Image: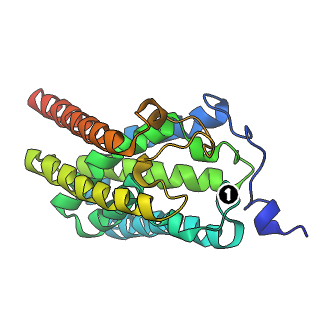
C-alpha cells in the first residue's frame, strides 16, 4: 500500500536519482560558500546584534532537529537498503559527532567543543560533500536529500560562524584531543562492527555488495584493521593542514 512516508517525499527513489557533480550536487555547496562569505562580511554586525544569542540557539536547535529527523525517518522508512536494523545506525559516525559538538559549542561557546567540531567538520564533513554516497537514491524530490545537506553543511557553517563572529581560535593541543577522541571512538566502532551484522561505523568496513554509492572511503584498504590505521593517519594529516592554514592566515592579518 502506498504511504506518503515510505514511497513519497520521505521515501527513496531509484539508484541514480541523485548524480555526482550535477546541479543538485553543486548548488548546496555554492549556497554554503555564499553563507560563509556573508557571515565573514557581516561578522561585526552579527557580533553586536541584540538577537544574536537567540538566533544562535535557534540555529543549534534546527541542527539538532536535522540530526534527529534522520533517526525518526529510519523508524518508518528504513535505510537505503530497505533494512530496519537500528543497531547498525547508531550515532557513531564522525560527522554525527561533529554535529553534536557543534550544537553544544553554539550554545556554550566552549573552546574545546568549537575545536572538535572545526577539526572534524571542516575535514570529514567536507569530504562527505564531495561524494555524498548515501543519497544516490534520494534526489531533490526526497526529504533525505535536504536532511543530508543540513546535517553536513550546518556544522561547517557553525564552525566558521564561531570563528568569525565570536573570534574562536584553533588550538594545537585540541587537535590531538580531537584525534585521541576519534581514536577511542574508532576502537568502539571496530568492536561494534564485528558484533552487529551490517554495521559499518566510521566506514571501517567495506562491502562492495552492499555499497550504495561510490565514496572517497572506497580508496582505503578493505581490511578493517588497516583502514583503522589509514583513517588515523589521514585524520592527523587533515587536522594539521587545517591548523597550519589557520595559523598562516592569522599571521598575515
Residue at (24, 69) in percent of width and height: 108
**Judging from the image, what secondary structure is the residue with disc 1 in?**
helix
Quarter holding the N terminus is bottom right
**Is residue 126 shown left or right of residue 130?**
left
Tell me the quarter of the image containing the C terminus. Answer: top left
Question: Would you say 39 lies left or right of 200 here?
Answer: left
* Residue labelled with disc 1: 143
As rendered, which of 228 and 216 lies closer to the eye? 228
Q: Position of residue 155 (x, y in %)?
A: 39, 53
Q: How is the image coloured?
A: rainbow
Residue visible at 20% across and 52% down?
178
At x 64% / y 59%, what residue is drawn?
79
Residue reaching furthest right? 1
Can residue 225 be seen here? The reply is yes
Pick the residue in front: 195 or 237. Answer: 195
Which residue corresponds to the image point at 64% horizontal and 73% vertical from the top-left? 75
**Figure check: 56 above or below 202:** below
Tell me where residue 16 appears, x and y as whole percent. Answer: 73, 37
> Quarter-wise, where is residue 127 in the image?
top left
The answer to whether residue 142 is left or right of residue 147 is right
Q: Residues within 10 Å of mark 1 (few under 14, many from 20)?
A: some
Work out whether residue 33 can be spotted: no
Residue 181: x and y in percent read 22, 57
Q: Nearer the viewer, residue 6 or 148?
A: 6
Q: Residue 81, percent across and down?
A: 68, 54
Amino acid at each position: 500500500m502506498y504511504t506518503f512516508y515510505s514511497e513519497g517525499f520521505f521515501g527513496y527513489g531509484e539508484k541514480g536519482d541523485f548524480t555526482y557533480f550535477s546541479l543538485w550536487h553543486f548548488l548546496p555547496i555554492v549556497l554554503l560558500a555564499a553563507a560563509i562569505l556573508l557571515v565573514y562580511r557581516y561578522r561585526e554586525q552579527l557580533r553586536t546584534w541584540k538577537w544574536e544569542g537567540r538566533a544562535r540557539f535557534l540555529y543549534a536547535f534546527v541542527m539538532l532537529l536535522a540530526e534527529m529527523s534522520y533517526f525518526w525517518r529510519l523508524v518508518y522508512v528504513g535505510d537505503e537498503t530497505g533494512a530496519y536494523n537500528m543497531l547498525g545506525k547508531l550515532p557513531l559516525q564522525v560527522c554525527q559527532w561533529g554535529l553534536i559538538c557543534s550544537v553544544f559549542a553554539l550554545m556554550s561557546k566552549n573552546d574545546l567543543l568549537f575545536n572538535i567540531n572545526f577539526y572534524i567538520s571542516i575535514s570529514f564533513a567536507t569530504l562527505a560533500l564531495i561524494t555524498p554516497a548515501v543519497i544516490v537514491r534520494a534526489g531533490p524530490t526526497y526529504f533525505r536529500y535536504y536532511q543530508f545537506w543540513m546535517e553536513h553543511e550546518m556544522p561547517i557553517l557553525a564552525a566558521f560562524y564561531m570563528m568569525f563572529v565570536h573570534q574562536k581560535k584553533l588550538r594545537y593541543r585540541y587537535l590531538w584531543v580531537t584525534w585521541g577522541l576519534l581514536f577511542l571512538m574508532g576502537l568502539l566502532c571496530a568492536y561494534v562492527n564485528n558484533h552487529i551484522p551490517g554495521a559499518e561505523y566510521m566506514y571501517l568496513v567495506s562491502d562492495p555488495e552492499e555499497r550504495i554509492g561510490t565514496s572517497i572511503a572506497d580508496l582505503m584498504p578493505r581490511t578493517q584493521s588497516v583502514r583503522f590505521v589509514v583513517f588515523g593517519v589521514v585524520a592527523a594529516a587533515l587536522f594539521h593542514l587545517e591548523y597550519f592554514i589557520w595559523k598562516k592566515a592569522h599571521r598575515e592579518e
